[in-house]
Image (spheres, grey):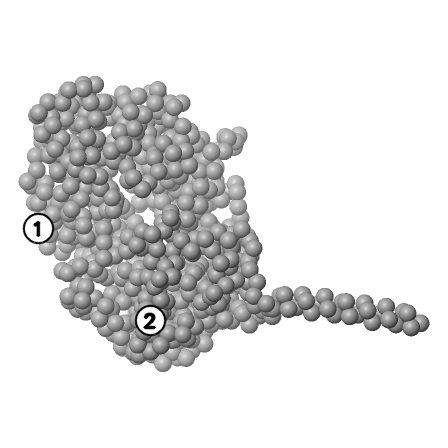
Amino acid sequence: MQVWVSITILLVYVAFTFLLGVAISLMSPRTCVLMQCNARSELMKESVDTDTQPCDNFYQFTCGRIASNRSKNRMTVWDEIERKQLIRLATFLSRENRSDDHEMLIVAKRLYKNCVDPSKRIDPEGLQSFLENVVIIGGFPLLPETYTNGKGSISKTEGSAIMHGLETAHFYEVKIVNIYSSLDPIPRFSTPKALTNKFLPSFEKQVKFVSELYKILSENETITDEVRDVIDKTVRFKEKLWSAADSDRQGLKTYSMVDYAGFVYDLEMRYIHISDPITLLLPGQSLTDILISSGFESYIKKLDELVHSTDYKIIKNYSIIEHVIANILFLPKPLRQIYDKYMRNPDDPSIENSANKQIACANILRRKMATVLSSIYIRHYYSPVATYARLYSMIRNIQKIMKPLINSADWMNTNDKDDANINLYHVSVTNPLPDDVLKYFTNKTEFEIQCATFCFANFTLFDDYLVLNAETDYYNIIHLNTTLPWNIYQEYHDVFSTKIYYDYARKSIIIPSGLLRYPSFHSQWPRYLNFGGFGSLLLLELIRALDFAGVNYGSIDLGESLWSSFAKVNYDRKRRCFLDQYNKHLAPLKGANVTNLNTVNEIIQDNTAIAVAYQAYQEYKKSRFFPEANLKDWHAYTVDQLFFINYATYYCTKFDKTYVKGMTDAEVASPSHEYKVVSSLRNYPKFSEIFNCKIGDGMNPADKCSVF
């Protein structure tokens, strides 16, 4: 009997010791061993600059290595997200054809596979198709035998190129977009992407590139003094254009609404007529407003002056050269080689690099066929409902935090609070394709009938590519005033994008499914990564949905206001606090005060989002018995500190906005990424508490602003 008692006591002791060990192990700091945790840890290490103290400047602490070009690969979170999204599309397009593939998908796969491996068709088919199209659009003055137009205009040059499918927007870019405050689609003008790149080859390299291009196209190794002089003038013209676009290279591109007639009148332009593309793209539509990028007004004035002082042949030469650059992946090897040698940024991989080419080719097709490819991808490969179910617990935590904040707001009356709470619980999350668009593309018969007129004769691959460009532009134009979904063939509805936004028409936050994966989200991650990163982005759009930026005071109609007079007056006082802070930041950099309260709407969204995201994370932590796992190599920081570090990495950028003297209010309307992070955290007392920042430190001023 005593033996059995002894054995029982021993077993109880062993079990107790084992359970105690497990409990101690679980309650002790642990390390997340998921592959995605280790990858996220490495990505954060690439950006954090430990030489800067967090309490001095948290942006420089978190993003300093990327901002100062000391990171090994300078890969930001958004670079990695975009790369992952394009890899998904590339994988989709590289699959073998299926018996039920739609013709448009078959064409996309054919273009993609030959773009990735040009040796099969692009190289053997040569330059004949390109040269024929150059002649059709007026020729190349450097090659007199192709040049037929003695006179012309930029509008005609661009318009002709659009009709024949050549990539355009070499002088200015105009797209038709849909925004919440307008029932009709409106034009959006911006400086062309080619001129907003941060890298421009040296004058000598550009001259060498054009010279080699001339030799290849003319099949003549001799360059006369006359031709050399024309080449020099053409490159000088491009450099002047690039210089004219300086203000649009000072940060990420932002847009503002302006009165169309007033804008055109104030510009007093003689040679650039922005009404021409509007007439082409929106025939018969009466416009009151247009969207312009922050630096567009300054750029377009300089462009008008340049056109006035430049021979049209030089302008035409520049246009054809840019056509070559824009279509370089669909042109034969000799042209790709000279581009790689003279025009490529040395920090970028060769365009012949296999992995890089897969992403580049996928991105070309995404720009032209995003909605078509997205709908087919959704139909075949994933269920949107199952994908977005992962977010529901996070959204419930956010709603639980937001409601008491709204109810305690001293600047809102009871009716304002009731309306805000109703909106809070009606906001949903969904995929980028509205039901009517998805139904249209899922209805295979209707889709096939609509696409049957796409004339892919398959003479040469370059011809097919031009037809795709021309036909998608044409069909988007003719659908503008029909019951069919407009902009259906291009990038507005795109599951392969990286953009989260609030769609006022659908009352939903639109989230491309790829953002619910590494490196922005993972269901098995420690939650400080999900709440601090993706959660704060989700909250930005939720706050936009509730209109706590004060733009329309609760209404999606610019002419209507749902907020009470009490709320508007008191809320504007809070906006004034943020504007005063921003002006103090700008004073030594810009030298002038900004007076428009709308300037700080985006800043308020950032400030509110991170504070609510942190409180939502704390609410989640209450449901846990054991502490969350740390990240490898980050045990010097608490999980709360990692929450803020992870948040700030989403704002790291290689090229942040630079404030310079003389910038207009429009040019500073969108704050730099550095200011977004610094403003959001220096106004949040919890941040200073967690990082032990003293009053007077850069990140802990005595005077703070807040909405709630």
Quadrant of residue 338 within the rendered picture: top left
Name which residue type carries label 1. Glu
Going by the image, does 377 lie left or right of 48?
right
Q: How many marks?
A: 2
- For label 2, the residue is 699
Please name the residue shown 48% across and 67% down the image: 638
Question: Is residue 154 among what the camera can see?
Answer: no
Q: Secondary structure at mark 2?
A: loop
**Distance from label 2 to label 1 (Cα)?**
46 Å
Q: Percent position (x, y) of residue 34?
A: 55, 53
Q: Percent position (x, y) of residue 260?
A: 17, 53
Please name the residue shown 15% across and 23% down the image: 143
Q: Residues within 10 Å of mark 2 (few under 14, many from 20)?
A: many
Q: Nearer the viewer, residue 190 or 457?
A: 190
Which-is-in-front pick, marks 2 and 1? 2
Q: Which residue extends farthest left?
A: 309
Look at the numbered discs 2 and 1 and tell me whether their residues touch, using CB distance below 8 Å. no
Quarter that holds the N terminus? bottom right
Q: Secondary structure at mark 1?
A: loop
Going by the image, does 185 lie left or right of 279?
right
Name which residue type carries label 2. Met
Please name the residue shown 31% across and 60% down the image: 673
Numbered mark located on residue 268 in the image: 1
Quarter that holds the C terminus? bottom left
Q: Percent position (x, y) of residue 23?
A: 66, 68
